Amino acid sequence: MSIHSEYSNSKAVSLLCSLGLFLAGYIFYSSSLIESFYRSELALSSWQTGITQSAVPLGAILGAILAGRLADLWGRNRVLIWNFLLIFVFGLLSSLCFDFYSLCFARLLNGFLAGTLYPLCAAYLIEMTPPHSHARKTAFLMFVNCLAAPVGCIIAMLLSLVCDDYILWRLCAMAHCIPALFAFYWVKQLPESQAWKTHKKSTKTGLNIIFSNQYKNITICLIAAWFLMDVAYYGINFFVPYLLQAMQVKTMVSSLNHQWGTFIINIFFMLGALAAIFIVEKVNLLQLQKYGFLCASLSLFSLAMYFHVGLHQSFFIILLFVLFNFSINLGPDVTTYLLSATSYPVEIRGSGHGFISGFAKSGSFVGVLLLPKIQDYWGYETVILSLSVLLFAAYLFTLQFAKIMFNTDKEGHLSYEAT
């Protein structure tokens, strides 16, 4: 293969994986957009609404674990081809929901397919692009993942100009079918990972190895950090409009319609991810993750204390939310994804990343399902304080992970290799 061909494939793979993470992000983030519409149409209770919302991350747990293993057995490219095709098919079917049970089934399947994209894109990107560009390309992937949130809001706002609510949420639920079909035809033109071809006959088995003595402590630290981040990240993302309303924040969230409010809030999620593209190659990834968790924890702790003393100044509340979003997306959102892909050898890379990302999605499931109930029983101050504690625990797990890697590599840093 010529150098020009390798460069072209590398660029194409990077863009394809970015599209994959965009699709995953859209499926996750669009849940908060369409929730009020299907809840009203289908007359769902608050408990049924929580179940339908949590069906997406629950499906993602199973999808990530299974896809990671299949990627190690069958190849990254082959599984991606089938994945994009199924996303297109089931995306169309998700617009045909007629009751609570069909809605749960559709959300579960879409979440399953969204979850598969995390390990598949991670393994394919790492093995098909130059090692020196992994950090920057991963940061771009996570930025595109965050970009799905405001794009979803824009789609909903545009559709609302010409559609009634009955059609609107169904079109939003299937809007990702178009880029999925494009990705399906695109990935068929790309080659399989050469690194996977070289190691595919390895006798190692994925889940046994990642919990062996060699990798056990690394796996636990990676799982814990990503899991705790997802509890906070997705919990806040799904319910921040309701939290702000409960806090009586007189902002654009309450004065404009639901799509505009969600759009404005989701813009904050993009700022840190955008900044990460420019600085991720200049900063040690473990340091970036460590201080990202610490700053995010301190911002929510400050917010909880602010409410505890009875203050409710809108500017300060929004500022601390922005600091939380910026810190998470600048550091941990990128580093948890990249470290989980580069901490294992090729033959178990899909299985390792798949299991970690799948278990992490159980954090989003827990956050989406339980945070509203915690808010109902103990108030939003308790929700915010709890998330602060969880993020500080993620900071401690990152410290432990850095210690483990330092003992493994006496130079104190990881070597990011694709093979």
Image (spheres, grey):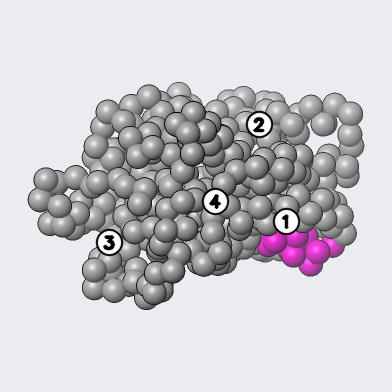
Is 106 in the magenta? yes
What is the secondary structure assignment of the residue under circle 3? helix
**Residue 320 versus residue 207: which sits nearer the camera?**
207
Give the alpha-carbon distance from disc 2 to disc 1, as whole Å. Answer: 22 Å
What is the secondary structure assignment of the residue under circle 4? loop
Instruction: Give the residue number, with chain letter if any, for mark 4.
Output: 192
- Looking at the rendered image, the disc whose residue lies closer to the viewer, 3 or 2, is 3
Q: Which mark is residue 408?
A: none
- Comes first in the chain, label 3 or label 4: 4
- Comes first in the chain, label 1 or label 3: 1
Give the alpha-carbon distance from disc 1 to disc 3, as whole Å. Answer: 33 Å
- Looking at the rendered image, the disc whose residue lies closer to the viewer, 3 or 4, is 4
Is 409 in the magenta? no
Instruction: Give the residue number, with chain letter if any, for mark 2.
Output: 151
> Residue shown at 19%/45% (left/top)?
413
The rendered magenta stretch, by its main secondary structure, is classed as: helix
> Residue shown at 45%/27% (left/top)?
274
Asked whether the viewer can see residue 105, the reply is yes
Q: Which mark is residue 218?
A: 3
**Residues at discs 3 and 4 in contact (Cβ within 8 Å):** no
Check disc 1 and give the amino acid type.
Answer: Leu
Check disc 2 and give the amino acid type.
Answer: Val
What is the secondary structure assignment of the residue under circle 1? helix
What is the secondary structure assignment of the residue under circle 2? helix
Instruction: Give the residue number, with chain letter if any, for mark 1.
Output: 86
- Residue 323 in the image: state x and y as whole percent: 39, 31
Check disc 4 and give the amino acid type.
Answer: Glu
